[in-house]
Each structure stands twice: as C-alpha cells, then as structure tokens.
Image (tube, helix red, strand yellow):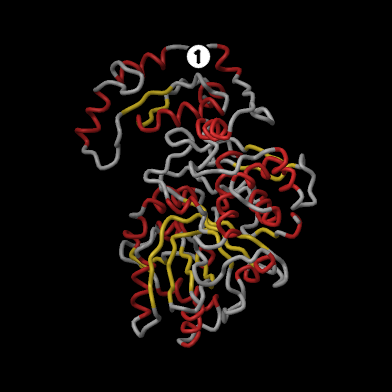
C-alpha cells in the first residue's frame, strides 16, 4: 500500500497460506482491507528450489486460480478509491453484556475468546467495584497501551478494564496494584510470535510479604493465590486489552506455551539471597516494590553446583538461541554455592557467562532469533552485532550480551536447584517507547 500510495508503484504481498487469517486481520486493523495479497502453500522453509518453483507455478491455495496469473492480474488492476482512503474501525465495546445465567455468560466469554478457557470469576459490577478499591486511581484513567506484535496498532485501556480482567482471574483487591503496574508496562503476556513466547513475572520489594507471595518451596507454582492470580490476570488482560489473541488470527505461536496459563509469576527470595535483589540491580531502592515482566520460552533444570559446573553451564548457555536471552533462577543453596566458587555478585556471574559462553560465528547466526531479529539491527550498523556479522567463520561470539543475562534467587532451600530459562526483557525495538523501563514500580498504582 505504501509503495502504491506514496510512489505509484503497484505491489502485491505474497504470504504463506498458514498466515491467511493473520494477514487479512492485520490489513483490516491497519485500515487496508483492500491491500493486494496472494498466497503460496506452507511451508516455505526447508524446501528445494524445484518445490518452491512448483508453488509459483501452481494455484493460490487461499484465493484460488493460478498463482502467477493472479499476481499479474492484481498488478494490472488499479486500486479502488475507497482503498486509498483507508478505513476507520469502530473499536468501541459495550460496558455490559446482556443478562443471562452463569452458564450462558461463561459460554459468551468463551465464544468471544475473552478467557484462557479455564473457569473464570464472572466480572459483575459489584466485583469490579470491589477490585477498584485496591487502587487510588480513577476507573476511567488510562493505564497504558499494548499490542501482540510490533506490526499491529496499540490499544489503550483504563483502570476499570484492567479490573475486569483481574476479577476474571480470581485476583483480590490487594493484588490489583501489581496487576496495574504490569498493565502499565505495555508488555504483553500474549506475544504473537511463531516462537511461542509466554510471560514471566518477577516481583520484588515489601509487597511480596504484604500479599504473602510465594518465594520459597513451590514458588513457580501452583501453590499460592497471589502468584497464580497475578500471573493469570496478566495473561487475560494481555489478550483482551491488546485487540485479541486468537490462534491463527492474532496469535501465531506454532506450538503454544503452557507457561502462558500462569505467566511464571513469583517473588524473589531476597532475604535468603547472598546477592542484591533483582530490582536493586535495575536501579530501584530496596524498599520500593517493583514488578518485572519477561518473555519466556522454556527452561533447563539442574541440581547442585558440582566441580564440573563450568562445563555444564557452558553447554546450557551455548545451546540457547542467542536472541532469547539467559535467565538463571537459583535456589538460595545454589546461589550460595556460586558465591563459594568465586561469584560474590550477580554481575560477576553475568560477566563470566558473557566471557566464557561463546560459539563460532557460523553457529551464532544459524539460529532463528539471530537470523530473523538481530539482522535488522545489523542493517542499521548497530554494534556489537555488526561486528559479529562481519566476523570470521570460526571467531567466537558471546551467546548473550550482559544486558540479556539475568539472575534471580527463588526457592525454599530444600534442594540446590538452578534452572536456565530462555527468557529476556522485551526488546527495546518492540516497546511502546525505547525508553520504557523493563522493571516497573508498583508504588504509583496503590
């Protein structure tokens, strides 16, 4: 559309048929429902040249008819005037749904994709009003903006809409400031990437004790109401307040991610950690309550910090896709053991990982994240990735930069467990503003 409108050059978008609903949806919400588009079969990766040529010489599996004939026909047809004007979408929604029985209302929420398909607490006016008592903010105050991917528009939402989703998740009013802080971050727990990311949430500061959050045995779930409800509320508000999260249309995770049910929500065990708390590393005062959302993909489990820990840690880190990030969750026993072997601070351990966990240049760039996400900043000439791209084939490159390596202490000292999660902060390029902080203060939302 931009080529056509701004430069007078006709263009046709070519997409894989697995993304047909997504493409139509994106065109519609961006005011371009008439954008020209054709489709080829899926997959397009790991196909031979002959197989790909057969796609071009065959039929459009979505629109029908010979693919190339359709491309040429669309290029020759002028766009109608209404297409050049764009489309304004009505994004309003009724505040109340029609009355019905409990079963009817639950079915209504499911039919509209407003739930994660676990039972919800129906958000009656009385329950939402009770939730609003958990904050001093006005119900109609705008909290933030969110979207499932960088190529979709930002949706705005107010305090009351966040409260509706908090009620649905089973949260209590005292949980609401944490949920509002998460909502204010603009980071979504329902990211639409085909890589199937979920959310992870780390809470720091005095509010951990105020809410009786679990930071010890079983902290990552499922044994604590605050942990569970806050994490679920983050997921529900993300899918409902960003314009939807429907598989094949606004959510494209290839396999999905079971971590999305709880957003892996827990509090850091600050009192039993030998290191400074995570939020202090991010520049906050120890007595300030904060919440940090991450993207998370999966994890690898370990028990005990034995003599061979350097080899094991190297294997764990170098097996990761560089873009996804390295986040270590350590039981206090494991954290103290890492202190014993020379890491008096989290930063010292982070620096060791950066310096020692490296792979050859060819291996670094032979990853989904590196190839598809870091290449854009290489084109902009950003360092150090431009140098990594120009390195020799056997030159060793760090798997993760220091700002993409995180350490959090959690667990009940019943086992020297430590886990490596593929987890990172939201990439600055995909935030609402590049200056948005990764860690958010909860205090303003009380």
Image coordinates for residue 278, horizontal then vertical, percent: 60, 69
Image coordinates for residue 397, horizontal then vertical, percent: 40, 66
Viewer-proximal residue among 31 and 410? 410
Viewer-proximal residue among 300 and 368? 300
* Residue in the picture at 52% in, 57% down: 200
With respect to residue 141, does 6 lie above or below? above
With respect to residue 164, does 173 lie above or below? below
Residue 324 relative to residue 345: left or right: left
Residue 75 relative to residue 403: left or right: left
* Residue in the picture at 31% in, 20% down: 68
* Residue in the picture at 77% in, 39% down: 140
Viewer-proximal residue among 278 and 310? 278
Residue 8 showing in the rendered view? yes
- Give the residue pinned by disc 1: 79
Q: Secondary structure at mark 1?
A: loop
Which quadrant holds the C terminus? bottom right
- Number of marks: 1
Residue 435 showing in the rendered view? no
Residue 436 relative to residue 420: left or right: right
* Residue in the picture at 35% in, 61% down: 361
Q: Residue furthest left?
A: 50
Query: Splitting the image into 4 quarters, where does residue 40 fall?
Result: top left
């Amino acid at each position: 559309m931009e080529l056509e409108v701004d430069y007078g050059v006709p263009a046709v978008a070519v997409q894989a048929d697995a993304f047909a609903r997504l493409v139509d949806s994106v065109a519609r919400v961006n005011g371009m429902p008439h954008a020209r588009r054709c489709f080829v079969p899926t997959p397009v990766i790991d196909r031979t040249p002959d197989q790909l040529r057969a796609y071009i010489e065959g039929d459009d599996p979505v629109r029908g008819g010979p693919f190339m004939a359709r491309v040429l026909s669309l290029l020759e047809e002028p766009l109608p005037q209404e297409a050049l004007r764009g489309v304004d979408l009505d994004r309003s929604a009724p505040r109340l749904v029609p009355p019905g029985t409990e079963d009817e209302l639950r079915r209504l929420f499911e039919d509209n994709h407003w739930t994660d398909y676990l039972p919800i607490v129906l958000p009656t006016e009385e329950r939402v009003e009770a939730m609003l008592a958990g904050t001093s903010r006005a119900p109609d105050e705008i909290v933030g903006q969110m979207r499932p991917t960088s190529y979709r528009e930002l949706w705005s939402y107010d305090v009351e809409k966040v409260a509706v989703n908090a009620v649905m998740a089973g949260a209590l009013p005292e949980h609401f400031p944490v949920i509002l802080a998460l909502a204010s971050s603009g980071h979504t727990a329902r990211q639409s990437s085909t890589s199937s990311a979920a959310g992870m949430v780390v809470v720091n500061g005095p509010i951990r004790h105020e809410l009786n959050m679990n930071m010890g045995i079983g902290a990552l779930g499922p044994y604590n109401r605050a942990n569970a409800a806050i994490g679920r509320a983050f997921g529900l508000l993300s899918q409902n307040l960003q314009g939807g999260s429907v598989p094949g249309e606004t959510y494209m995770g290839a396999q999905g991610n079971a971590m999305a049910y709880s957003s892996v929500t827990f509090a850091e065990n600050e009192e039993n950690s030998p290191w400074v708390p995570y939020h202090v590393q991010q520049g906050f005062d120890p007595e300030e309550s904060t919440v940090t959302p991450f993207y998370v993909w999966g994890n690898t489990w370990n028990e005990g910090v034995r003599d061979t820990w350097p080899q094991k840690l190297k294997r764990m880190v170098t097996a990761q896709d560089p873009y996804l990030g390295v986040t270590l969750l350590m039981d206090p026993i494991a954290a103290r053991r890492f202190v014993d072997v020379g890491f008096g601070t989290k930063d010292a351990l982070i620096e060791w990982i950066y310096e020692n966990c490296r792979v050859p240049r060819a291996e670094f760039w032979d990853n989904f994240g590196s190839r598809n996400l870091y290449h854009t900043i290489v084109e902009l000439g950003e360092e150090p990735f431009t140098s990594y791209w120009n390195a020799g084939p056997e030159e060793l490159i760090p798997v993760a930069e220091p700002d993409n390596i995180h350490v959090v202490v959690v667990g009940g000292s019943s086992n020297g467990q430590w886990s490596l999660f593929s987890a990172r902060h939201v990439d600055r390029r995909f935030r609402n503003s590049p200056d948005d902080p990764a860690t958010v203060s909860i205090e303003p939302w009380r």
